Amino acid sequence: MVRAAGNKIQAGVRLDTTDLSEGGLFLRSDLLLEVGEDLTLEIPLRSGKSTVAHGRVAWVTRGAGAKAAAGMGVEFARLSPDDRRALAENLRDLTKSNPTK
């Protein structure tokens, strides 16, 4: 789960992510923002801490078809060096614990 806030999401909302990398993520959601909209993401890490990233909606899909999920591709626009390092370590740990993905 990722917490997101932006121009249209004042109070914040929790969203599922199905694809997370050092460059961005995919947020599954029926609430779709416009391409180019900025948002702040709070991403929980396995350590119990969270990292904060400022992102921009890069693309949107409405989820046509049974297997396609509605959601948004978000690229990280700003991520502090410490948060980038924490995210990279978290991704390495996830890859080690689940090598098939």
Image (cartoon, rainbow, N blue to C red):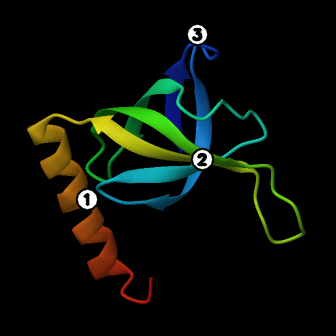
SS at circle 2: strand
Amino acid under disc 1: Asn
Amino acid under disc 2: Trp
Q: Mark 3 or mark 1: which is in front?
A: 3
Residue 84 percent location from the top left of the image: 18, 46
| Mark 2: few/some/many CA within 10 Å (<14, 14-19, 20+) | some
What distance separates the C-alpha of mark 1 from that of mark 2?
25 Å
**Mark 1 or mark 2, earlier in chain:** 2
| Image quadrant where one finds the C terminus | bottom left
What distance separates the C-alpha of mark 3 from that of mark 2?
21 Å
Residue 83 percent location from the top left of the image: 19, 40
SS at circle 1: helix
Residue placed under numbered mark 3 in the picture: 10
* Residue drawn at (58%, 10%) of the image: 10
Residue placed under numbered mark 2 in the picture: 59
Quick one: which residue is furthest to the front in this view? 36
Residue placed under numbered mark 1 in the picture: 90
